[in-house]
Amino acid sequence: MAIDAPILRDLQLIVPNLHRRYSGVTATNRMVAPRLAKRFRAAWFGSDAPDGIARMDAADLLKCWRRRGPLIWHARRNDEMILGVLLKALGWPLKLVFTSAAQRHHSWLTRWLIRRMDAIISTSELSASFLRRESTVIPHGVDTDRYAPSADRATAFAESGLPGRYAIGCFGRVRAQKGTDVFVDAMCRLLPRYPDFTAVIVGAITIDQTGFANELKERIEAAGLQSRVVMTGEVPIDEVERWYRRLTIYAFTSRNEGFGLTLLEAMSSGAALVAARAGAAELVVEDGVTGVLTPPGNVDALVAALEPLLRDPDSASAIGARARKRVVERFSLDAEANSIAEVYRALV
């Protein structure tokens, strides 16, 4: 559906989302775009448009050719940068912005595209170190109203129908990169000793990871924990939020990660966090205060960090409360949107 002519005429910001598969990048984009739309006349171009921002189609985009006044084009992926560079070369009055969360050396194509951006945002100092040009460091934020603790966590957990009194979770696509196997191995060792806890793995199992997921299920069955290590598969976002509110402990087990938004979502929801040192964990978590940091891929370290929290759920709740406070103060969605807005204003 085309957007209204007055909106198109006064447009200041285009948020492209050209990736058809829903991903963490899409999720972060969907959260912050409506906040940016409160500060700029903005439109979303592509799939998975959130509420709170106008939606534009290809016909709308064509109408922006040779218009007066600059348009911010904020890309988060290579294909979005490529389209932005092409449109600018053909006469669209674009100011190109790219957000990088990657913590690795970029391909030659990505480096070439980055050099053609008018401004670069990185989500952490580590991400910035791989860019080979100046960037503005702006950590991701989270909607602290949407991801908020339950008023009664015990009742919220009971509504799940799962055994026990407490939940420990690990969210994200089921795959080795996310460390799902590390979590399962830790649960197979810990849950027999802590019958009040049930483990929940929330996330999609893609076709290419079916074998990996089946192997994990075999480990769970061998440990006799079929009813206490639950894989939900992919669920709607509102159901993901409900699962967060049921958690007492959250395990972030990624071996490598761009940022790792589940860190903030879990902390904002008041769960005690045990996090591998991947993505933004060292930026977000105050070790021993708002969570516990562990080496990536290390089952023994994960077990050692989780066991005191399983033994003392009240202590876990206290850590979760401190984690929630830190996110509200430092990593809110409005803080992210305000910082991004400053980058835009410097360009236009």
Image: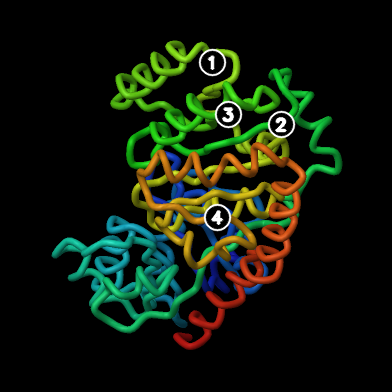
Q: Which residue is mark 3?
A: 200
- Tell me which residue sits at (60%, 32%) in the image: 236
- Tell me which residue sits at (32%, 62%) in the image: 103
- Is residue 165 visible to us here? yes
Name the kind of residue labelled 2 in the image: Tyr
The number of discs equals 4
- Tell me which residue sits at (33%, 61%) in the image: 102
Marks 4 and 2, how far apart at CA: 19 Å
Name the kind of residue labelled 3 in the image: Val
First-in-chain label (2 vs 1)? 2
First-in-chain label (2 vs 3)? 2
Question: Mark 3 Cα within 10 Å, few/some/many (few <14, many 20+)?
Answer: many
Is residue 185 left or right of 170 when viewed as pictured?
left
Q: Which residue is mark 4?
A: 292
First-in-chain label (3 vs 1)? 3
Q: Which residue is mark 1?
A: 225
Q: Secondary structure at mark 1?
A: loop
Is label 4 in contact with label 2 (beta carbons under 8 Å)? no
